Image (cartoon, rainbow, N blue to C red):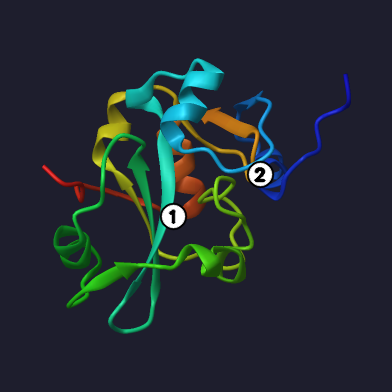
Amino acid sequence: MAKEVKTNAMRILDKNKIPYELISYECDEFIDGLHTAEKTGAPVEQSFKTLVAQGKSKAYYVFVVPIAEEVDLKLAAKTVGEKSIEMIHVKDINAITGYVRGGCTPIGMKKLFPTYIQESAKDYDQIYVSGGRIGYTLKLNPQDLAKLVRGKFADFIVK
């Protein structure tokens, strides 16, 4: 089997001596988080997607959200202190984050944007997030992730 290529996210985790497990799966194109969890065997409630939004101020914000949930834009705007926010367009993901759709992770974006992790992540010893490319998932401790990306835990999903 070919040696796994280290992504920027993995190099950053290694450099910071943060333990993680890489789970790779066969996939040539974007699939949503639910299908990714199915392919990797990761529990749905412990699997998180990375979404990027832009506030009225033009600032960008990263939201780490359970894969089966949606961001409540009003609640998220209140969380980050903006009048309003909206999700960025899929076509802009790479230019803003350096990652592609389906491979976007909160670790190692072009800039360290304010990052908010859904507070339910604290219920688990390990969560699953994208590994920085399609076909890679990282299993790591949510507190380690928060420390690394200077993330804050908050509640911002649709009830």
> Is residue 71 found left or right of 138 in the rendered image?
left
Q: Please name the amino acid that badge 2 sits on.
A: Arg
Q: Quadrant of residue 4?
A: top right
Residue at 15%, 59% in the rendered image: 75
Q: Quadrant of residue 98?
A: bottom right
Label 2 element class: loop
Residue to which mark 2 is pinned: 133
The relative height of residue 134 versus residue 107 in the rendered view (above or below) is: above
The relative height of residue 48 versus residue 156 in the rendered view (above or below) is: above
> Is residue 67 found left or right of 154 in the rendered image?
right
Residue at 87%, 27% in the rendered image: 3
Q: Quadrant of the C terminus?
A: top left
Q: Please name the amino acid that badge 1 sits on.
A: Arg
Residue to which mark 1 is pinned: 150
Where residue 146 sits in the image (x, y, percent)?
42, 45
Label located before the other in sequence (1 or 2): 2
Q: Residue furthest right?
A: 2
Q: Residue furthest top?
A: 41
> Is residue 109 found left or right of 74 in the rendered image?
right
Where residue 16 sits in the image (x, y, percent)?
64, 43
Report the label total: 2
> Is residue 34 found left or right of 148 in the rendered image?
left
Residue at 57%, 43% in the rendered image: 30
- Please tell me how crowded label 2 is: few (under 14), some (14-19), or many (20+) other residues with Cα within 10 Å: many
Q: Residue furthest left?
A: 159
Q: Quadrant of residue 131?
A: top right
Alpha carbons under labels 1 and 2: distance apart: 22 Å
Residue at 55%, 45% in the rendered image: 102
Q: 29 and 107: which one is in front? A: 29
Label 1 element class: loop
Where residue 55 sits in the image (x, y, percent)?
31, 75
Q: Which mark is residue 71?
A: none
